[in-house]
Every structure is written in C-alpha cells, then in structure tokens.
Image (cartoon, helix red, strand yellow):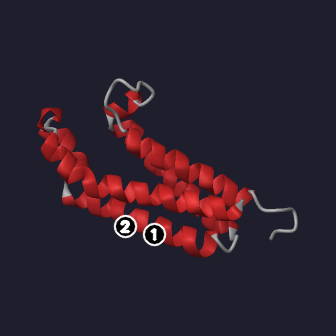
C-alpha cells in the first residue's frame, strides 16, 4: 500500500512539473485568454517556482516518504494544499473545474488529487507496527 502511495505522490508531482513546463506553450496556443492571465502562469518566475516545488516534492516522495517519515508526508501535504488554495484564489478557470465542458485547470487539479491520495496511502496506509 505504501509503495503505491509513493508512486502516486511522485506521479502527482511529475504531472505538476509537466503542467508547469507546458504553460508557455499553452499560452502561445491560447492567445484569447489574455496576456495578464497568461503572464501569471507562463512567465519564467512562476514556471521556475512551480518546477522547483515539483522537484522538491518528487525528492520528498522518493526518499523520506518512501522510508515512512511522517514529517515528509505532512510537509508535502501542506505544499499541495497551499498550491491548491493559491491557484483556486487566483485563477478563475479553476472554479469551473467540475464542468467537463469548460476549460479550466483540470490537469493541475488532477495532479493535486493524485498527490493527496498518494500521501494518504503512503503516510497512513502503513500497518500498526509502523512498517
């Protein structure tokens, strides 16, 4: 159960890394979204920051979370929740994420859900002996 959780956490962060790296190409392909909104997510600073956070999350998943260290699970959970709150508060497209017929931040939300589900399995899916 823990190995599957670690894999899901790593997959969530890899998906977050992908969405961050793809943001500039997405911005060029969708000029109708407006330059101000696209600059928020496709500029070098937000892309670099999200990529750095995703790489730290992958490292947390592959080293301390895999060893069963709960501090890393809580740290990773806090990072994912902060990302989710900030994105929902600043991106109006995230409010339509439940409507499959409208464009929103579906990939981002899926990455966060996969990561949180993986953390649940990795951190709390261990047996009562802690192994």
Tag 1 residue: 56
x and y percentages locating residue 115 in the rendered image:
54, 53
Tag 2 residue: 52
Using the numbered discs, state the Cα–Cα distance from disc 1 to disc 2 in whole angstroms.
6 Å
x and y percentages locating residue 97 in the rendered image:
41, 31
The kind of secondary structure element at disc 1 is helix
Figure check: 49 above or below 82: below
Q: Is residue 63 visible?
A: yes
Residue drawn at 50 percent across, 72 percent down: 59
Which corner quadrant holds the C terminus? Answer: bottom right
Tell whether 120 sits left or right of 61: right
Question: Which label sits on residue 20?
Answer: none
Q: Is residue 46 visible?
A: no
Give the crowd class for mark 2: few <14, some 14-19, many >=20 residues within 10 Å: some
- Hey, which residue is sitting farthest right in the picture? 129
Residue drawn at 39 percent across, 37 percent down: 89
> Residue 128's quadrant in the figure?
bottom right
Figure check: 5 above or below 67: above
| Between 108 and 95, the one nearer to me in the picture | 108
| Between 11 and 113, the one nearer to me in the picture | 11
Residue drawn at 41 percent across, 24 percent down: 99
x and y percentages locating residue 96 in the rendered image:
39, 27
- Labels in figure, total: 2
Which corner quadrant holds the N terminus? Answer: bottom right
Give the crowd class for mark 1: few <14, some 14-19, many >=20 residues within 10 Å: some
> Residue 123's quadrant in the figure?
bottom right
The kind of secondary structure element at disc 2 is helix
Residue drawn at 83 percent across, 62 percent down: 127
């Amino acid at each position: 159960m823990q190995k599957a959780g670690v894999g899901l956490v790593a997959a969530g962060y890899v998906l977050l890394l992908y969405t961050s790296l793809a943001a500039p190409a997405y911005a060029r392909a969708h000029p109708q979204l407006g330059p101000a909104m696209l600059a928020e997510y496709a500029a070098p600073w937000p892309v670099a920051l999200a990529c750095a956070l995703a790489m730290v999350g992958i490292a947390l998943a592959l080293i301390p979370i895999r060893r069963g260290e709960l501090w890393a699970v809580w740290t990773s959970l806090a990072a994912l929740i902060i990302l989710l709150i900030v994105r929902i508060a600043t991106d109006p497209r995230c409010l339509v994420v439940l409507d499959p017929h409208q464009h929103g931040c579906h990939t981002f939300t899926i990455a966060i859900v996969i990561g949180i589900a993986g953390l649940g399995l990795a951190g709390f899916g261990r047996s009562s002996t802690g192994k």
